[in-house]
Amino acid sequence: MSADPNLSDYETLEPLLRAAETVGAAEAHGLITGVLCAPQANAAALGKTVLADMNPGTHALEIERLLGALRARTQRQLDERASEFAPLLPADESALAQRSASLADFCRGYLMGLTAGGVTDLAQLSGDAREIVQDLMEISEAEIEPDDDEAEEDALIELTE
């Protein structure tokens, strides 16, 4: 994700979030990104999403610090528009099923983040935005076929891009 030691990668954040009994790293990044892209992007909206159901005794301060750094980096990438924004996903060496499920989680989180950030009717979005949201809805329901790993790998790369 980044060489900056203050920012987490998927493998660092995922077990902390799972231990706290909340969403996974990919879905948390989707939520953060969705809220930041929504008309009411604010800390309260983020609090209602990622941290809302967190078990408060489990690494709470570390999780909040890492998610804050992830939010700041995501905001910077979105503001720069020319940056290399990418969803927070498991490493390419991870199992295809895990990477596919994480991409679906990111998309699901993004859609929930838009809603938490004030988008009340996804169908009312403008043409391009509505098309992107429809694509994300489809990806959020994606499942891999166990028969053809090479074709599924290619499809996952294409979806992620």
Image (spheres, rainbow, N blue to C red):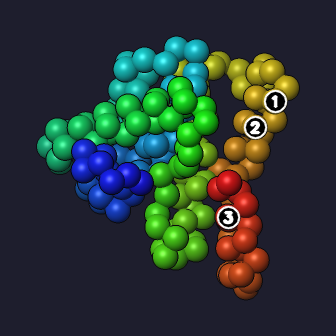
Relative to the observer, which residue lies in front, 132 or 3?
3
Q: Alpha-carbon distance for marks 1 and 3?
A: 22 Å
Q: Please say if 77 is above or below 39.
A: below
Q: Position of residue 115 (x, y in %)?
A: 58, 25
Residue at image point 61% right, 45% down: 107
Q: Quadrant of the N terminus?
A: bottom left
The residue that mark 3 highlights is 157
In the rendered structure, which disc, 1 or 3, sits on the residue that comes first in sequence? 1
Q: Alpha-carbon distance for marks 2 and 3?
A: 17 Å
Residue, far bottom: 147
User: Taking the image as drawn, is residue 53 in sight?
Assistant: no
User: Taking the image as drawn, is residue 126 in sight?
Assistant: yes
For residue 12, the mark is none
Relative to the observer, which residue lies in front, 37 or 45?
37
Q: Based on the displayed image, in which of its 4 quarters is residue 118 positioned?
A: top right
For residue 132, the mark is 2
User: Few, some or many C-alpha atoms within 10 Å of disc 2 (few <14, some 14-19, many ≥20)?
Assistant: few
User: Few, some or many C-alpha atoms within 10 Å of disc 1 (few <14, some 14-19, many ≥20)?
Assistant: few
Residue at image point 19% right, 43% down: 62
Is residue 35 left or right of 126 when viewed as pictured? Answer: left
The residue that mark 1 highlights is 128
Q: Alpha-carbon distance for marks 1 and 2?
A: 6 Å
Q: Amino acid at mark 3?
A: Ile
Q: Please say if 17 is above or below 68.
A: below
